[in-house]
Image (cartoon, rainbow, N blue to C red):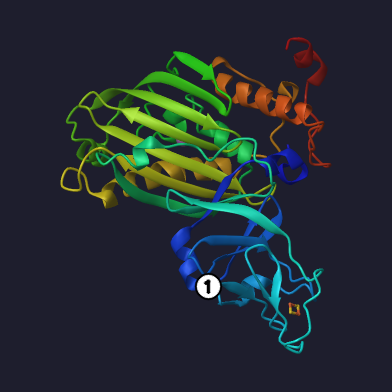
Amino acid sequence: MLTTQQPVLRRFWYPVMPIEQLLNGPQAFTLLGQPLVLWLDANGQPAVLADRCCHRSAQLSLGIVENGCVRCPYHGWEFDSQGICTKVPQLDADTAIPKTYRVPAFQCAERYGYVWVCLDEDPLQPIPRIPEFTDPSFRFIQEFYETWKVGGLRAIENSFDSAHGHFVHASSWGDQSNPQPPPIDEVTETEFGFVMKHWLEVLNPDLQKKNLGIGEEKTIRTNTRTWYMPFARTLKIDYPNGLTHFIFTAYTPIDDQTSQVIQFCLRNDTEAEAKAADIIAFDRQVTLEDRVILEGTDYDAPLSLAEEQHMASDRPGIIMRHRLARLLKEHGETEQRRSDRVAPATPAKVEATR
Ligand code: FES
Ligand code: CO
């Protein structure tokens, strides 16, 4: 699936940038192939327009903020958060600005310290609700904001793949002598995706022991993973000592091949019990282990099951592919693919067994 070629994906909210980055003036971000300029308006609220001036196509993100508007760097026209041109320095004060001097505006909101953007006027789902964010027993730890060369579906599928850990994460928490993925206890489909629960027995390397306040070599933890269509998830890890390690991760689609990885963590312990820097260091190691593998995968992940082979632990990813295929169908779209992709080995045979 090529994310930029499926218009229905424009109908979801995506986190795009920590809000504090906007304190540095207008910022550029590309979402689903759409170049955007983001800034803070006169009320300190985020504003998002297409990053292309309607005069001579200059990038507004190279301009400055003036009176809560973004000022084009080329001839100084100013645009408000609705994309309406509010000032043309070359016009006399008593000449009206033509109504056609306008740049497309998009919906945006601040949540969890990030600016979220929806490219469509009519989002299909709200921004994911994370009650732990406002729960005073949880502390907020900002983890990652970085660009990976990976397609959105590959990345999000990996977050629900319980078989890769013992291999990809062999240096952090995996256990290659015990490669059987745990059985998935339940997958409950929701309006926005699904919730999946399972038990997982994992090794506790030294840093992890310190972070968790758990001395044992192994712990059985309960994982609750929630998928928010199309490319975001939360992972709630409950440990036997009462600790909850909650992670939000979004793979915001920049284009077909690239995702902006956004991750923060919420924990119900204190800095004295586990240093934020140590928690980030461990999650960083795990995340980089995923990154190496994911950046080597084909960004054009197929929704059809015929092109790739599958095993039982792929169930969450298979549900995702079915749900996304259904989403496209419901909106009158067909899956768009890379034109030069490698032909599948045995498409007809596998298709027949679906
Ligand atoms: Fe923006 Fe001329 S290109 S004001
Ligand atoms: Co992983």
Q: Looking at the image, which is closer to me, 43 or 96?
A: 96
Label 1 sits on residue: 25
Residue 115 in percent (x, y) is at 52, 54
Q: Is residue 54 visible?
A: yes
Total residue callouts: 1
Q: Is residue 6 visible?
A: no
Residue 280 in percent (x, y) is at 33, 48
Packing grade of label 1 (10 A; few <14, some 14-19, many >=20) is some
What residue is drawn where x is 74% and y is 65%? 103
Numbered disc 1: secondary structure: loop
Q: Is mark 1 within 8 Å of ligand 1?
A: no
**Could you tell me the amino acid type at mark 1?**
Gly
The extreme top residue here reads 353
Quadrant in the rendering for residue 327: top right
Q: Looking at the image, which is closer to me, 306 or 293?
A: 306
Q: Where, quadrant-wise, is the C terminus in this rendering? A: top right
Residue 66 in percent (x, y) is at 57, 78
Q: Is residue 14 above or below residue 196?
A: below
Q: Is residue 61 above or below residue 16?
A: below
Q: Looking at the image, which is closer to me, 32 or 166?
A: 32
Q: Is residue 47 above or below residue 186?
A: below
Quadrant in the rendering for residue 265: top left
What residue is drawn where x is 17% and y is 31%? 215
What residue is drawn where x is 77% and y is 31%? 331
Horizontal side, residue 351 vs residue 268: left or right: right
Horizontal side, residue 336 vs residue 145: left or right: right
Q: Where, quadrant-wise, is the N terminus in this rendering? A: top right
